[in-house]
Image (cartoon, grey):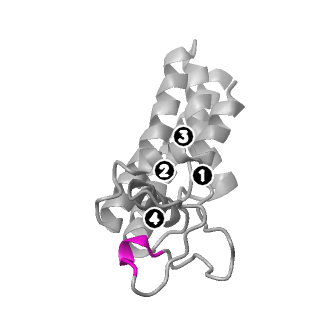
Amino acid sequence: MELTKNNKIINLLVIVAIVITIIGFLVDLRNTLIYPGTDLRNRIVGARLMLEGIDPYFFKWHPGLSARFYDPLDISTELLSKVSVPPTVLALHSAIAGLSYLQQKVIWLIVQWAALLGTVLIFLKTSNSQSENNLILVVSFFLPTACFGVFTLTQVKYISFMFFCYQ
């Protein structure tokens, strides 16, 4: 009797976690479509600069230059730009650097959520029992929402955190 009651509670938690995750995705999608984001823009500008052979780390935009190289969050009085990722990350972003910023944001949102779901699937495939599966689902879907807020347009640090938590 007690085992059945615990299973019902765990199943309810799994359902709630999945519902919260779906809501989180919808909020992320809305935020992606409405807000400009912060971390992605400087990476895209950095990738565009790199593709043009311009140093993205010391570049400062000024009137007369293409708006494709403009990052509204970059502070013109600072020596360094806001680009804070290595060239390898800029090379990855260069694949979408020619698209509109809205298209880039939607692609980035999909990549982040696919990475989260992919990580969860890896853990589910390596678990040995239904109770482990339930624990993985509850923790995987509650943790980003409860501890860090819903996924935003930032980095994949949430996924990295979850990956290392399970190690």
Residue that badge 2 annotates: 90
Mark 2 element type: helix
Q: Residue at x 55, y 63 (%)?
A: 39
Q: Earlier in the sequence, mark 2 or mark 1?
A: 1
Q: Earlier in the sequence, mark 2 or mark 3?
A: 3
* Quadrant containing the N terminus in the rendered view: top right
Q: CA distance from mark 2 to mark 4?
A: 9 Å
Q: How many marks?
A: 4
Q: Amino acid at mark 3?
A: Leu
Q: Give the image location of residue 152, x and y in percent.
A: 52, 60
Mark 3 element type: helix
Report the side of 27 relative to 95 (left or right): right
Q: Give the image location of residue 124, x and y in percent.
A: 51, 23
| Residue 8, visible in the rendered structure | no
Q: Where are the magenta residues, as a range?
A: 65-70
Q: Give the image location of residue 29, x and y in percent.
A: 39, 62
Q: Residue at x 45, y 73 (%)?
A: 36
How many neighbours does mark 2 have within 10 angstroms: few (below 14), some (14-19), or many (20 or more)? many
Q: Looking at the image, is mark 4 or mark 3 nearer the viewer? A: 4
Q: Residue at x 64, y 29 (%)?
A: 6
Mark 4 element type: helix
* Quadrant containing the C terminus in the rendered view: top right
Q: Amino acid at mark 4?
A: Val
Q: Amino acid at mark 1?
A: Val
How many neighbours does mark 4 have within 10 angstroms: few (below 14), some (14-19), or many (20 or more)? many
Q: Are marks 4 and 3 in contact (CB under 8 Å)?
A: no
Residue that badge 1 annotates: 85
Residue that badge 4 annotates: 45
